[in-house]
Amino acid sequence: MKKKLHLFCFLFFLIACQTVSEKIDQKVSKEEIELSKYLNKTEAELKIAFGKPNQIKFKKDNKNRFYVYMSKKMNITCQRTFEINQSNRVIGFTSKNCF
C-alpha cells in the first residue's frame, strides 16, 4: 500500500512539473513573437512602446547600443534587451525571465 502511495505521489509530481514547463514554454514563445514585432523598427518607435530604457550599454569594438528594460513581477526580474544599430534601427533582442 505504501509503495502505491509513493508511486502515485511521484507520478503526480512528475505530471505537475511537465505542465508547468509547458506553460512556461508557451509564455516564452508568446514573448518572442511579441518582441520580434520590433525588429527593424526605429529607436523612437521602441521608446514609444517601452518608454525610456533602464540602462543603455555599449560593447567594445561595437558601435551598436543595447537598450535594457527591466521590470519586476512576484520578485522575478524580467530583463528585455534590444540592440540598436548605427541607423537607429532595432536589429536584435533578448528576453530573460519574462514569462
Image: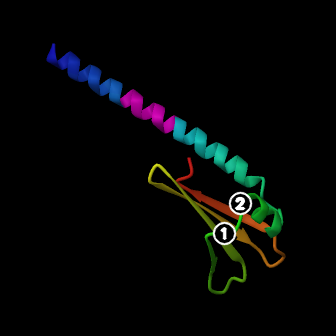
**Relative to 30, is 72 on the left or the right?**
left
Dot label at residue 53: 1
Q: Specify whether residue 19 is painted magenta.
A: yes
Most common SS among magenta residues: helix
The residue shown at (56%, 51%) is 98
How packed mark 1 is, by other alpha carbons closer than 10 Å (few <14, some 14-19, many 20 or more), is: some
Pick out the residue farthest to the left: 2
**Residue at x 52%, y 53% (from the top left corner):** 97
Query: Under tag 1, what secondary structure?
Result: loop
Circle 2 Cα neighbour tier, 10 Å, few/some/many (<14 / 14–19 / ≥20): few
Task: Reply above or below: 11 against 17.
Answer: above
What x and y, as percent, mark residue 65? 70, 77
Residue in the image at 46% along x and 35% along y:
20
- The colour scheme used to paint the residues is rainbow
Percent coordinates x, y for residue 71 in the rendering: 56, 58
Start-end of magenta stretch: 14-22
Q: Is label 2 in a helix, a strand or a loop?
A: helix
In the rendered image, residue 56, in percent from the top left (x then y), is placed at 64, 76
Disc ID at residue 50? 2
Q: Which amino acid does label 2 sit on?
A: Phe
Distance from Cα at disc 2 to Cα at disc 1? 7 Å
What type is the residue that disc 1 sits on? Pro
Question: Do the residues bearing badges 2 and 1 touch, measured as CB atoms within 8 Å?
Answer: yes
